[in-house]
Image: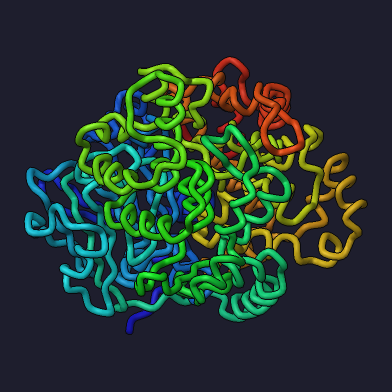
Amino acid sequence: MKEIQGTSNRYLCIDMTTKTWAVQKISTEDLRLYLGGKGLGIKLFYDRLKDRLGSIDPLGEENLLIFSNGVLLSTGAPCSARFEVITKSPLTGLMVASSCGGPLGEASKTAGWDGIIVAGRAEAPTVVRLDSTGATFESGEAYWGMGTHEVQEALGMTVKEGAAVIGPAGENLVPFANICSGHRFAGRGGVGAVMGSKNLKAIVARGREYRCVPVDPVMFEKNMKKVKKHILRNNMTQSYRAYGTNANVRHGIRTGYSPVRNFRDRYHPDIEATSGEAMAKRYSTRHSTCRHCMVLCGHKGRYPDGKMRQIPEYETIGLFGSNIDNYDPDIIGEWNDLMNELGMDTISAGGVIAWAMEAGEKGLRRTDLAFGKVENIACTLKDIAFRRGEGEDLARGVRWMSETYGGTDFAIHAKGLEIAAYDPRAAWGHGLSYAVHNKGGCHLGSYLIGMEVLLGYMPRRTTIGKHHWVAFLEDLYTGINSLQGCLFSGFSIMTEPAIPKYLPKAALNVSMLFTPRTSMMLMNWSGFSRFFWAITGHRLTQWDFKRAGERINKLERYMNVQMGMKAEEDTLPRRFTEESVTKYPETSVVPIEKMVKRYYRIRGYDPATGGPTEAQLQKLGVML
């Protein structure tokens, strides 16, 4: 097996229109400034389309679909079997980057490619196969209409191969269709619809021709030993290892972030039936994870019908459980299987169905969907994927539905992206994260719920200091998504040093709010920067790493402004800012305007546009 020291710095460029391919070399400077993964994908998208960002139709030929591998991939670093999908979203009209832990990344990386850039549109359904020598094109007609796992089986792949595929939702251009690789998904923002718009049913990569080795193996091994120790001993990691992300359910019951009846209520006594602890017992769960994983949050279990299923993630449990007034985990598991096979984002699907239930209840539109009614959900999901009947409307998402029929007050989205299953009235910093994240209502923009609730590092309902932490964690998380590590390893690595780990919680709470910069100095995320340094040979401190995250975030924000994003979109639905009384005993609304103003101030964003100035970008080293 041949070796690649560090990175190959080669992207495979595929033109679906002409069925040709070429190689794009990546400069050392771009790798250093943008780290790989999400960051480099954003930069490549900008370089190619900067003069046309506002006019590009997300489902048109001009849009690019970029699969970008990080430097960690195939090195054996913990939690590193990930790749990023970057494109212009058909759901939001803005940039979207979605992370996936499936096998396409490792297969393409060990075929010698740091990423794949897909342009154009084929005349008919197509499958692209690639290896170290380039790409070949074959008819995908026989696979069109197949589900995501069905098509992966039909492709007849060997152990050296990994694929990225779409299901019927992607074929029918549902704006929240996803991309499947193995049993993992690039889930948000409609990346699957963009793939479908190119008539690309599947990409199959044949790898294991190269082995990626660090430039400095001694530094790499030393850093890996330290990082593994931190991940294994972290409380949040241990909770996810035991119960999956559904360990978050009981936190929601306790603190009132549970989504109930389209986020109208924040509590219901039956939510416990969908907790990670209850499901672990009910299904005798075991681990089912991404490769090289140490967090082990992915679980599977035996359901009462005898079928072994992937346990749905917390977001799916929340949005197809309490948010539609359903407390039966068995049927959520069946719906999760169905959505995965159809190839659609469970968060957006759950959000639009809950909105339709409330809109029907209020007489805004006719529908058979109703809270607590479960017998028509499966057929509704199929109707969305095939865009038939009511599914044609639902497929357009919450923003379109509410602007068409009314009901914007209870349309639970940010910038057109349906909000994940944490009610921000319980954790105001997490609400700010939803409001200002470049992608829209994604929970993983800065995941401040982790600091506010899961780890208890700061009071939940205060505006003090939250803008500092959202900006800081956005930069770190963007850096992690550019290395292409797992975000769940972030808190483990960052908070395990002795001072944040053992400082009394009362003292930590005060420090995090009133001296946030000092608190940041007490943390240590050099595990990420030292991985980049060891693998590539390019010196990178932890503060250089954070600055790279800032550079990527601000370039992406600048691109969004060019695509039409307005400053007034950095906000939350009125349900969260005006409706304080729910079934949870604590009353609360999110003072979002105050926090957004503070966030703009420390980011240096222009209040008129909501974006950075060109001078600010140039100071960060961004060449426009």
Q: 391 above or below 343?
A: above
Splitting the image into 4 quarters, where does residue 150 fall? bottom left
- At x 38%, y 56%, the residue is 336
Whole-percent x and y of residue 444?
56, 48
- Work out whether residue 219 or residue 286 is closer to the camera in this orientation and state it: 286
Q: Which residue is drawn at 65% across and 34% down?
A: 432
Q: Relative to 393, does residue 2 appear above or below in the rendering?
A: below
- How far from the left and from the top, in percent, is residue 298? 49, 67
Q: Where is residue 621 in the image (x, y as percent from the top left)?
A: 56, 39
Q: Which of 476 and 434 is in front in this view?
A: 434
Q: Residue at x 38, y 73 (%)?
A: 308
**How many numbered tags mark residues here?**
0
The answer to whether residue 513 shows anywhere in this view is yes
Left or right relative to 92: residue 121: left
- Across and down, in percent, residue 294 comes to 57, 74
Quarter of the image containing the N terminus?
bottom left
